[in-house]
Amino acid sequence: MIPSLRPSARLRTQDGLPLLHRPVPRDLLLAFLLTPSIAPLVLDRADSDLFPWELTGAVLLVHLAVHVSRTSPPLSLLIAAVLSILNVWLSVTLLVMSYLAGRRMSSPRGALLSFAAVLAVGSLVNLVVLDELWSWFTTVAALPLVMVFPWVVGRYVRLRDELTVGGWQRARQLEREQDLLAEQARMRERARIARDMHDSLGHELTLISLRAGALEVQTDLSEKHREAVVQLREAAAAAAENLRDTIGMLHNAAEEPLGRDMDELVDRARASGVRVELRRQGEADLSKVADLAARRVVLESLTNAAKHAPDSEVRVEVTHREEDTEVRVTNGPPPGGPAPAAVGGRFGLVGLHERLVLAGGSLEAGPTPDGGFAVVAVLPHEGPSGGGGVAVSTAAGPLPVAERELRQARSRARYGLVFTVSALTTGVLIAVVASVVLVYQTLNSVLKPTDFEELRVGQEQAAVERSLPSYEYRQGRRNVSETDPPGGSTCRYYRSTTDMFAPADIYRLCFADGRLVGRNAFSPGDG
């Protein structure tokens, strides 16, 4: 038995996209649905000898307009406009193409050019070729309704969809950024732990190496024990080297640990054989950043003194002044001359300088005149921003991506709003002007019934024209079913009343050879 397929499965193509969501089937369906819109042409032109060709051409134009609506929306507008010019009842296709153009055009410039082209072509055909003022007025009045308004609706739907898609994309981007921030936080924590390991273990390994070196020079030590001490010192140095390499790979600009208490650092260094003296002057409540920086200065200075000047005297002086605190660590020259090169870390004076800058202070380090070394740090009691925080740069730089996209979206929205309002205003103004012209021409194409009754067949044309209004009622023949005019004559049409909303008789005057050869009155119901 053949397994049944779900309707959704049967309507899907090989690439998994629903059949009706593919461009070609959707366009074919749309063209099929628009084909009945040419029914008015069938009713209006069914008796014409050219009707089969006109019908075929109309169907082809509908399908062509739908086909090019994706690749060239302005061209689809022009094709649909041709149908509307041929028959005003075929404007359904133009309305749909205008909506699709608003959905599919990224810039309104093409729509503006299309509107102008349709207006120009419609005016040319109606005023010059067909000489039909009423048809021209209908074209101008219908332009905002069947082109501009549907395009504005399509444009609104497009912008709404773009905002929706952009919002979801932004949400996904924010989720990715949150994941990255979480990962960065984990990395900063690892770096903090690594820095803590460097500060503590590095200090301890240096003291172990220092103690091993002191044992190595003892005269009462046996050769076996001396060799063990040498191995201990070398192992401590190797461990410090490995620690430096490992921590070097993990180091970044993460926040550093708080560190030990300053008194404990000095006591541990003194217990390890370092001759260190701590002096304090005054009292102050340091900020967290400043207190951390002060401890780091003492820790790094004691470690460097133990490495480079063993057995030298080290003085740690902390002076609390009114606005800042000075931490000065000095050591004299080593008694036996310069010590062998010791294993050093990456986070020495460079790290101290960075920390002092973040704390809003300053750092000076260098040799003293007696051959020793001095480190002087000045730390403000308040942080660089007034509360112990880290200074934030306010230098001008490139705008963030979100800010740039927001400004671009606002610019597009303003431009689209200006264009939409301008297009609608222009369409309304054109319709108003056309209405004024039509009303003026209609009111000045009225031949009074009394004047019409005084006209006689055979009168000279010049005498008749003196009693005629300024304009001819050009659309008069469209409102009545008239009889055939006299052969070889030229006819003019006039209204019988200035009331534009009341049924009006249409007067036809026909001239030939400079004389009036026919005068007829047709009521709207004649035929």
Image: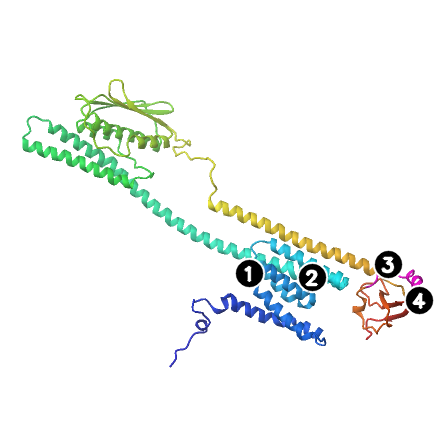
Query: Viewed as shown, does residue 15 lie left or right of 212?
Result: right
Say whether disc 1 or disc 3 marks the residue closer to the N-terminus. Answer: 1
Q: Give the image location of residue 406, x and y in percent.
A: 51, 47
User: Could you tell me the amino acid type at mark 3?
Assistant: Ser
Q: In this figure, which residue is indicated by the disc labeled 3?
A: 470
Between label 4 and label 2, give the one nearer the viewer: 4
Q: Give the image location of residue 41, x and y in percent.
A: 68, 72
Q: In this figure, which residue is indicated by the disc labeled 4?
A: 455
Magenta region, mostly helix, strand or loop?
A: loop
Other residues around mark 2 within 10 Å, as few (<14) / some (14–19) / many (≥20): some
Magenta region includes residue 292: no
User: Could you tell me the amino acid type at mark 2?
Assistant: Ala
User: Could you tell me the amino acid type at mark 1?
Assistant: Thr
Say whether disc 3 or disc 4 marks the residue closer to the N-terminus. Answer: 4
SS for dot 2 = helix
Between label 3 and label 2, give the one nearer the viewer: 3
- Up-down relation of residue 254 to residue 437 (above or below): above
Contact, mark 1 vs mark 2 (Cβ under 8 Å): no
Separation of disc 3 and disc 2 at Cα?
28 Å
Say whether disc 3 or disc 2 marks the residue closer to the N-terminus. Answer: 2
Query: Viewed as shown, does residue 179 lie left or right of 129?
Result: left
Other residues around mark 1 within 10 Å, as few (<14) / some (14–19) / many (≥20): few
* Numbered label attached to residue 71: 1
Q: In this figure, which residue is indicated by the disc labeled 2?
A: 142
Q: Give the image location of residue 404, x and y in percent.
A: 50, 45
Q: Quadrant of the C terminus?
A: bottom right
Separation of disc 1 and disc 2 at Cα?
26 Å
